[in-house]
Image (tube, rainbow, N blue to C red):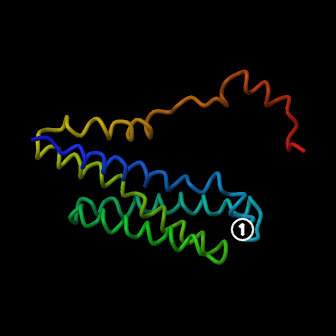
Amino acid sequence: MALPHGLLRLLAITCAATIANVYYAQPLLPTIGHGLGSSESAAGIVVTATQLGFAVGLLFVVPLGDIVARRPLISTLLAVDAVAFVASAVAPGLHVLAALAVLVGTSSVVVQIVIPYAATLARASSGPASSEPWWAPSCSGSCCPVPSPASSPAWQAGAASTPWPPG
């Protein structure tokens, strides 16, 4: 018996939404800076804090997936993520937001726990092949670089002729 398609979709959506947590703040830096009365470059600490939190999570939280039951760990990390996002929405200043960003980054490692959990469920139900359709893009996205339009000669030629900063 294969894993139910609904469960696979739920796990895939969980992975997509939580890994995106690490990147949500990047396009919002001007808005974050303006809203908290600081510059865009000062607001960049939020992105740095999220990445640092993610690294901490990889080092200290992901190994817990081999020690404790994964399902409650996943639920706890998702709850922490949700609370951190709600608190981020009402953060009174940049330092508080950066501290919450560390927490968001740390709890966003849930993806690295969901994938082996799903593989275990798939193996128990029908074999490893039943989990391949949804986790393969997640792994390939983090392992295989995708060419950027910025690397094209046409873009570089245009960028070289554009004055910086614009204005």
Quarter of the picture holding the N terminus? top left
The answer to whether residue 122 is left or right of residue 145 is left
The answer to whether residue 29 is left or right of residue 62 is right
Quarter of the picture holding the C terminus? top right
Looking at the image, residue 151 lies above or below residue 97: above
Where is residue 8 drawn, in percent x and y?
A: 26, 45
Residue displayed at 30% across by 65% down: 75
Where is residue 136 drawn, in percent x and y?
A: 34, 36
Residue displayed at 35% across by 52% down: 112
Label 1 SS: helix
The answer to whether residue 11 is left or right of residue 119 is right
Residue displayed at 42% across by 63% down: 107
State the residue position of label 1.
Answer: 35
Where is residue 60 drawn, in percent x and y?
A: 37, 64
Dot 1, crowdedness within 10 Å: few (<14), some or many (≥20)?
few
The answer to whether residue 152 is left or right of residue 70 is right
